[in-house]
Image (tube, rainbow, N blue to C red):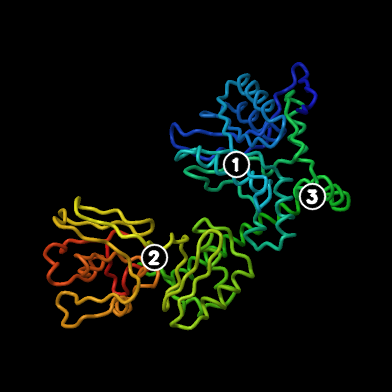
Amino acid sequence: MARSPRGSVPDGSPTPTLPLPVRPSQPRGARLWVALSGGLDSTVLLHALHARSAPGLRAVHVHHGLQAAAEEWVSHLRRQCRALGVPLTVRRVQIDPRDPAGPEAAARAARYAALAALLKAGDLLATAHHSEDQAETVLLRALRGTGIAGLAAMSELSPLGAGRLWRPLLSVSRAELQRYAQAAGLRWVDDPHNHDARYARSYLRDEVWPLLQRHWPQAGDSLARLAAHAQDAEGLLAELAQQDERVVGASADGALSVGALLALAPARRRNLLRHLWRGRGWAAPAAEWLQRLEAEVLRARADAQPCLRFAEGEVRRYRDGLYLMAPLPPVPQASVTWRRGCSLPLPAGCGQLRLARAPGETFTVRFPVGGERLRPAGDRHTRSLKALCQARGLPVWVRERLPLLFRGDRLVSVAGLWTVAEASEVLDSLVWDCDLPGLLSPKGSSAR
């Protein structure tokens, strides 16, 4: 474990201060967590917030186990927090070194997942990102060809889990943090990963950044200003996307109108789609992926039912409806027997069936395989399940998961949507509780 030499505070010298913003408001009893790595930046942040006598102050350290000295770091942090009287929580996470995203990205994802799980409503998590971190983020994202949202980089306050993420040091430079640490006599650990040129941010910080500052001393401030301008622009683009979302209008079952989307100018259409992605917590789609969405889904034939899958979900189209949805579980194959109880849980993704009273006889629940037919009560003709579903406007992914109730070998009800006359008395209160996108009919009726 590398530690800085202990600095000294001359007798009578004032306590060092940092230009921290006002702490965001919190409800009574909410906690302020500091994400404590043990490095210079987070050590200074913890000390500065403690000097402010911040109520509810706690520290949390995420132990990745990627360094041989990781246990020694935890011991150091425990001593540091004990000296300040600040409770410390250690969360251990497992990192797969073979993760396709790379160990750096995998560690970051695991770290934020652990931190988000820690927060309760009203809690704040303070991280020690400073102005150079902001500048590096802008530059890295620009090199990757990011959009305006990427150039906006890190905001001071943003949602995280049930609480919020607070970055109070974004206007503070690394040099200011170092001066504070020396004046306060602080000790910290030095993570060798921070100087490993295999990692993009480390390479930028140690190899590229000194060259940039030599020629453009104001580079950090300029890139921070760029991030602020991008945040303003991103706010305006979000407002425009909200207006367009109201025009395109999600239907009761969550579908967007394909026709209304195609009526938008291409740039506004892409802006709206990115906005919808972020609203679902998904990573912003790449330009190439949006091109595929345009060609393969939005401009597909009206009678096509395309599906475009990606890491976090899938985009499906049915008629004029575009559905952005989580990945669906496989279509169930096994049957389920229902005799007792007023409800029957169905396989994953298919919800449950409910009756006001237990059926009193045995029904077998199966799922469509094709060719099913029945004559609904009040109808003079026997109809195919496919025709009934098309008339009701049910997309194919809903049809595949419709619970079919059989009395012996005879189909007597389709999820309570259609029931034969001779089973109506027993199944008159049958309800299918399911949240599949597209389950609502165009007229607004639902299996629920």
Separation of marks 2 and 3 at Cα, in angstroms? 45 Å
Q: Nearer the viewer, residue 74 or 430?
A: 430
Contact (Cβ within 8 Å) of mark 1 with mark 3: no
Q: Quadrant of residue 127?
A: top right
Q: Nearer the viewer, residue 28 or 441?
A: 441
Disc 2 secondary structure class:
loop
Mark 3 — residue? Answer: 204
- Three-letter code, disc 2: Pro
Looking at marks 2 and 3 on the same chain, the residue that comes earlier in the sequence is marked by 3
How far across and how far down the image is residue 130, in percent?
69, 42
User: In this rendering, is residue 223 above or below 112?
Assistant: below
Q: Nearer the viewer, residue 241 or 350?
A: 350
Q: How would you rate the neighbour count of disc 3 (Cα within 10 Å): few for under 14, some for 14-19, many for 20 or more?
A: some
Mark seen at residue 437: 2
Mark seen at residue 111: 1
How far across and how far down the image is residue 217, in percent?
84, 49
Separation of marks 1 and 3 at Cα, in angstroms? 22 Å
How far across and how far down the image is residue 92, in percent?
58, 34
